[in-house]
Image (cartoon, rainbow, N blue to C red):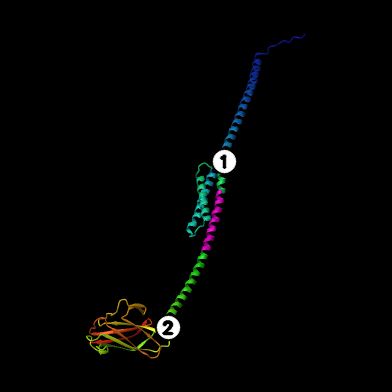
């Protein structure tokens, strides 16, 4: 058996040893403290990193949402502008004077309804991406629809202009032909009138004398108005190869010294292009044989002093004139 004996060191050496022991304990405590702080720091770093990651995620997400909102809003504005342009294009039809058939009227009505629906949809403040995509497709379809519609209107308008041009050309041709026909008819009428005028009987040696009737019924020539009872107008007819050798009516008009026509208002005929009254009328047979003729006119009223004028008509034209002075 062995026994250990403790021998106490000197007092100075004991103090140094104690100091060393204290330092060792302090170092051990410091190491323990540093380890705790490092753990806290690591934890804080992890927390900060997590917060930074979360903030970064939210920032990116908010940025995307903001970008999506801006994109949707911009697209809505663009689509609104497109719809307005489409509506303007559709209104151009009203500036073209084209009569629309039933189909085009129905197509135009349908296009207006689609435009109204799109405008109402785009006015909605909340619109989803799918609704926006649908609106985009509808706008594209509507653009194509209105484009085809306007092209059809333009085509119809061109056809109408061509038809109008052809019609106007035809009208001009017809009017030209009508003008020619009218001029020809006028010329023929003039020629016919000339022929009629040339074929009308013409009198010469027209002499007018006044007579009274004796008790025995014989005529006695007079020069005084107070004794005159009737006028006898004698005349010859010029030879005319164009005149018809047939019966002709000879009309007489007598004007008194005051210029008044002495005639029955019921006695009417047409000559020199106008209707007029006549004083007396006879029918003669014309054979172009130098026959002399006469008309005896009894005045239904008393003769007056002055000059009486007589005019003869045949075949619608003036035939000859004469006059007589009564004292």
Is residue 32 shown left or right of residue 98?
right
Looking at the image, is 10 positioned above or below residue 117? above
Q: Nearer the viewer, mark 2 or mark 1?
A: 2
Q: Nearer the viewer, residue 152 or 118?
A: 152
Q: Kindly report the distance in space between the C-alpha atoms of the residues bearing marks 2 and 1.
A: 106 Å
Secondary structure at numbered mark 2: helix
Q: Position of residue 275 (x, y in %)?
A: 35, 77
Mark 1 sits on what residue?
64
Q: Relative to 296, say whether 175 is above or below.
A: above
Give the residues drawn in magenta, as a range: 138-160
Q: Position of residue 305 (x, y in %)?
A: 22, 85
Considering every residue shown, the one lying at the far bottom of the view is: 290
The disc placed on residue 196 is none
Q: Could you say which quadrant of the image residue 33 lies in?
A: top right
Which residue occupies the extreme front position in the image? 216
| Residue on which disc 2 sits | 195
Q: Earlier in the sequence, mark 2 or mark 1?
A: 1
Q: Residues within 10 Å of mark 1 (few under 14, many from 20)?
A: few
Q: Is residue 81 visible?
A: no
């Amino acid at each position: 058996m062995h026994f250990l004996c403790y021998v106490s060191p000197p007092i100075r050496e004991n103090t140094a040893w104690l100091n060393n022991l204290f330092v060792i304990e302090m170092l051990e405590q410091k190491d323990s403290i540093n380890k705790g702080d490092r753990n806290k720091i690591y934890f804080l770093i992890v927390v900060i990193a997590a917060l930074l990651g979360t903030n970064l995620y939210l920032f990116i997400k908010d940025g995307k949402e903001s970008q999506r909102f801006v994109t949707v809003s911009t697209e809505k504005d663009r689509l609104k502008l497109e719809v307005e342009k489409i509506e303007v294009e559709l209104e151009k039809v009203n500036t073209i004077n084209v009569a629309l058939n039933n189909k085009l009227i129905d197509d135009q009505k349908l296009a207006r309804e689609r435009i109204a629906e799109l405008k109402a949809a785009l006015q909605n403040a909340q619109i989803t991406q799918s609704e926006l995509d649908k609106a985009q497709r509808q706008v594209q379809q509507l653009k194509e629809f209105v484009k085809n519609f306007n092209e059809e209107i333009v085509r119809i308008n061109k056809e109408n202009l061509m038809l109008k041009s052809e019609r106007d050309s035809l009208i001009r041709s017809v009017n030209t032909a009508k003008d020619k026909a009218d001029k020809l008819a006028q010329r023929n009428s003039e020629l016919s009138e000339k022929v009629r005028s040339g074929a009308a009987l013409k009198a010469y040696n027209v002499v007018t004398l006044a007579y009274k009737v004796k008790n025995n019924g014989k005529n006695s020539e007079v020069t005084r108005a107070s004794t005159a009872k009737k006028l006898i107008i004698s005349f010859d007819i010029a030879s005319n190869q164009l005149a018809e050798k047939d019966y002709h009516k000879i009309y007489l008009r007598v004007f008194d010294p005051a210029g008044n026509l002495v005639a029955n208002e019921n006695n009417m005929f047409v000559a020199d292009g106008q209707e007029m009254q006549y004083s007396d009328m006879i029918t003669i047979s014309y054979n172009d044989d130098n026959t002399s003729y006469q008309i005896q006119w009894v005045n239904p009223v008393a003769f007056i002093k002055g000059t009486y004028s007589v005019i003869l008509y045949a075949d619608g034209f003036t035939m000859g004139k004469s006059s007589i002075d009564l004292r």
